[in-house]
Amino acid sequence: MLRFRQRPASFLARLAALPLVWVLAALQPALVAQQEPGLKTTAPRLIHKVEPEYSPEAREAGLEGTVVLSVEVGTDGKAHDIRVQRSLGMGLDEKAVETVRAWKFEPGTRDGKPVAVQATIEMNFRLSGLPADRSKKDDKQE
Protein backbone atom coordinates (compact mmCIF):
# COMPACT_ATOMS: atom_id res chain seq x y z
CA MET A 1 0.00 0.00 0.00
CA LEU A 2 1.23 3.37 -0.95
CA ARG A 3 0.94 6.11 1.56
CA PHE A 4 1.27 9.71 0.74
CA ARG A 5 2.39 11.89 3.45
CA GLN A 6 1.63 15.57 3.35
CA ARG A 7 4.64 17.65 3.84
CA PRO A 8 4.36 20.40 6.35
CA ALA A 9 4.49 23.83 4.76
CA SER A 10 7.98 25.19 4.68
CA PHE A 11 9.07 27.85 7.11
CA LEU A 12 9.42 30.41 4.29
CA ALA A 13 5.89 29.74 3.01
CA ARG A 14 4.51 30.31 6.50
CA LEU A 15 6.62 33.43 6.91
CA ALA A 16 5.43 34.84 3.54
CA ALA A 17 1.81 34.53 4.67
CA LEU A 18 2.36 36.44 7.91
CA PRO A 19 2.79 40.01 6.58
CA LEU A 20 -0.62 39.83 4.91
CA VAL A 21 -2.16 38.88 8.24
CA TRP A 22 -0.32 41.74 9.95
CA VAL A 23 -1.53 44.24 7.35
CA LEU A 24 -5.12 43.08 7.66
CA ALA A 25 -4.93 43.25 11.46
CA ALA A 26 -3.45 46.75 11.26
CA LEU A 27 -6.18 47.96 8.86
CA GLN A 28 -9.08 46.58 10.84
CA PRO A 29 -9.26 49.39 13.45
CA ALA A 30 -9.11 52.01 10.65
CA LEU A 31 -11.97 50.35 8.79
CA VAL A 32 -14.06 50.19 11.95
CA ALA A 33 -13.35 53.89 12.67
CA GLN A 34 -14.64 54.88 9.21
CA GLN A 35 -17.90 53.05 9.83
CA GLU A 36 -18.62 54.59 13.23
CA PRO A 37 -21.92 56.48 13.06
CA GLY A 38 -20.56 59.40 15.15
CA LEU A 39 -18.00 60.48 12.52
CA LYS A 40 -19.53 62.96 10.06
CA THR A 41 -17.56 64.54 7.22
CA THR A 42 -18.60 67.63 5.24
CA ALA A 43 -17.04 69.10 2.10
CA PRO A 44 -15.77 72.68 1.93
CA ARG A 45 -18.30 75.26 0.70
CA LEU A 46 -17.51 78.33 -1.41
CA ILE A 47 -18.69 81.46 0.42
CA HIS A 48 -16.95 84.26 -1.55
CA LYS A 49 -16.37 83.98 -5.30
CA VAL A 50 -14.55 86.34 -7.65
CA GLU A 51 -14.93 85.97 -11.42
CA PRO A 52 -11.73 85.43 -13.43
CA GLU A 53 -10.37 88.10 -15.76
CA TYR A 54 -9.20 87.45 -19.30
CA SER A 55 -5.57 88.11 -20.09
CA PRO A 56 -5.11 90.61 -22.95
CA GLU A 57 -3.18 88.00 -25.01
CA ALA A 58 -5.96 85.41 -24.72
CA ARG A 59 -8.68 87.96 -25.52
CA GLU A 60 -6.81 89.12 -28.63
CA ALA A 61 -6.30 85.53 -29.78
CA GLY A 62 -9.94 84.60 -29.06
CA LEU A 63 -8.81 81.74 -26.81
CA GLU A 64 -11.58 79.94 -24.91
CA GLY A 65 -11.52 76.82 -22.76
CA THR A 66 -11.16 75.42 -19.27
CA VAL A 67 -8.24 75.53 -16.83
CA VAL A 68 -8.31 72.66 -14.31
CA LEU A 69 -6.71 73.33 -10.92
CA SER A 70 -5.90 71.02 -8.03
CA VAL A 71 -6.09 72.79 -4.66
CA GLU A 72 -6.07 72.05 -0.97
CA VAL A 73 -8.78 73.93 0.91
CA GLY A 74 -7.19 74.56 4.28
CA THR A 75 -8.72 74.82 7.72
CA ASP A 76 -8.42 78.62 7.33
CA GLY A 77 -10.88 78.57 4.38
CA LYS A 78 -8.25 79.53 1.79
CA ALA A 79 -6.90 77.64 -1.20
CA HIS A 80 -3.35 76.35 -0.75
CA ASP A 81 -0.93 74.33 -2.89
CA ILE A 82 -2.66 75.39 -6.14
CA ARG A 83 -1.46 73.40 -9.14
CA VAL A 84 -2.50 73.59 -12.78
CA GLN A 85 -3.69 70.16 -13.97
CA ARG A 86 -4.87 71.26 -17.43
CA SER A 87 -3.42 74.40 -18.98
CA LEU A 88 -4.76 76.88 -21.55
CA GLY A 89 -1.74 79.17 -21.70
CA MET A 90 -1.62 82.81 -22.82
CA GLY A 91 -1.86 84.01 -19.22
CA LEU A 92 -5.18 82.27 -18.42
CA ASP A 93 -3.54 79.73 -16.10
CA GLU A 94 -2.11 82.57 -14.00
CA LYS A 95 -5.49 84.37 -14.00
CA ALA A 96 -7.20 81.18 -12.80
CA VAL A 97 -4.70 80.78 -9.94
CA GLU A 98 -5.08 84.47 -8.92
CA THR A 99 -8.87 84.09 -8.92
CA VAL A 100 -8.90 80.97 -6.72
CA ARG A 101 -6.50 82.65 -4.27
CA ALA A 102 -9.14 85.37 -3.80
CA TRP A 103 -11.92 82.88 -3.07
CA LYS A 104 -13.02 82.16 0.51
CA PHE A 105 -14.35 78.78 1.63
CA GLU A 106 -16.08 77.41 4.68
CA PRO A 107 -13.63 74.60 5.51
CA GLY A 108 -14.58 70.96 5.33
CA THR A 109 -15.10 69.23 8.66
CA ARG A 110 -14.66 65.78 10.13
CA ASP A 111 -16.51 65.06 13.33
CA GLY A 112 -17.18 68.80 13.71
CA LYS A 113 -13.52 69.86 13.42
CA PRO A 114 -12.09 71.75 10.39
CA VAL A 115 -9.88 69.62 8.12
CA ALA A 116 -7.87 70.29 4.97
CA VAL A 117 -9.50 68.82 1.86
CA GLN A 118 -8.15 68.22 -1.67
CA ALA A 119 -10.37 69.62 -4.44
CA THR A 120 -10.42 70.00 -8.22
CA ILE A 121 -11.66 73.29 -9.67
CA GLU A 122 -12.59 73.83 -13.32
CA MET A 123 -12.30 77.50 -14.36
CA ASN A 124 -14.15 78.25 -17.63
CA PHE A 125 -13.01 81.09 -19.88
CA ARG A 126 -15.56 82.22 -22.49
CA LEU A 127 -15.55 85.40 -24.58
CA SER A 128 -18.77 87.46 -24.63
CA GLY A 129 -20.63 84.87 -22.52
CA LEU A 130 -21.40 82.62 -25.52
CA PRO A 131 -20.55 78.94 -25.45
CA ALA A 132 -17.57 78.23 -27.72
CA ASP A 133 -19.48 75.86 -30.05
CA ARG A 134 -22.33 78.38 -30.64
CA SER A 135 -19.96 81.16 -31.75
CA LYS A 136 -18.30 78.72 -34.20
CA LYS A 137 -21.71 77.80 -35.69
CA ASP A 138 -22.49 81.49 -36.22
CA ASP A 139 -19.23 81.92 -38.13
CA LYS A 140 -20.04 79.01 -40.46
CA GLN A 141 -23.51 80.41 -41.36
CA GLU A 142 -22.15 83.75 -42.61
Image (tube, rainbow, N blue to C red):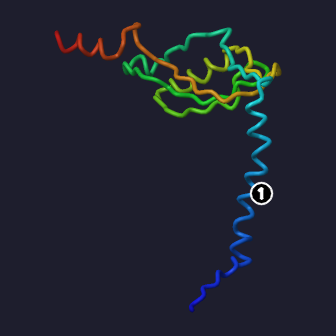
**Whether residue 142 is situated above or below residue 11 in the rendered picture:** above
Q: In which quarter of the image is the N terminus?
A: bottom right
Res 6 quadrant in image: bottom right
Where is residue 14? Give x, y as percent. Answer: 72, 71
Q: Is mark 1 on a helix, strand or loop?
A: helix
Where is residue 56? Give x, y as percent. Answer: 47, 17
Q: Given the current orientation, which residue lies at the most extreme bottom position?
A: 1
Q: Given the current orientation, which residue lies at the most extreme right position?
A: 113
Q: Is residue 125 left or right of residue 105?
A: left
What residue do we see at 70% from left, 15% from top? 105
Question: According to the image, label 1 marks what residue?
Answer: 22
Total marks drawn?
A: 1
Q: Given the current orientation, which residue lies at the most extreme left position?
A: 142
Q: Is residue 137 left or right of residue 11?
A: left
What residue do we see at 69% from left, 18% from top? 44
**Whether residue 34 is situated above or below residue 39 in the rendered picture:** below
The amino acid sitting under disc 1 is Trp
- Taking depth in this image into account, of 96 and 18 the one nearest to the observer is 18
Where is residue 93? Give x, y as percent. Answer: 53, 27
- Crowding at dot 1, Cα within 10 Å, few <14 / some 14-19 / many 20+, comes out as few
Res 62 quadrant in image: top left
Where is residue 78? Give x, y as percent. Answer: 73, 20
Q: In this view, does 32 lie to the left or right of 130?
A: right
- Taking depth in this image into account, of 46 and 10 the one nearest to the observer is 10
Q: Quadrant of the C terminus?
A: top left
- Taking depth in this image into account, of 70 and 39 the one nearest to the observer is 39
- Taking depth in this image into account, of 61 and 2 the one nearest to the observer is 2
Q: Given the current orientation, which residue lies at the most extreme front position?
A: 1
What residue do we see at 29% from left, 12% from top? 134
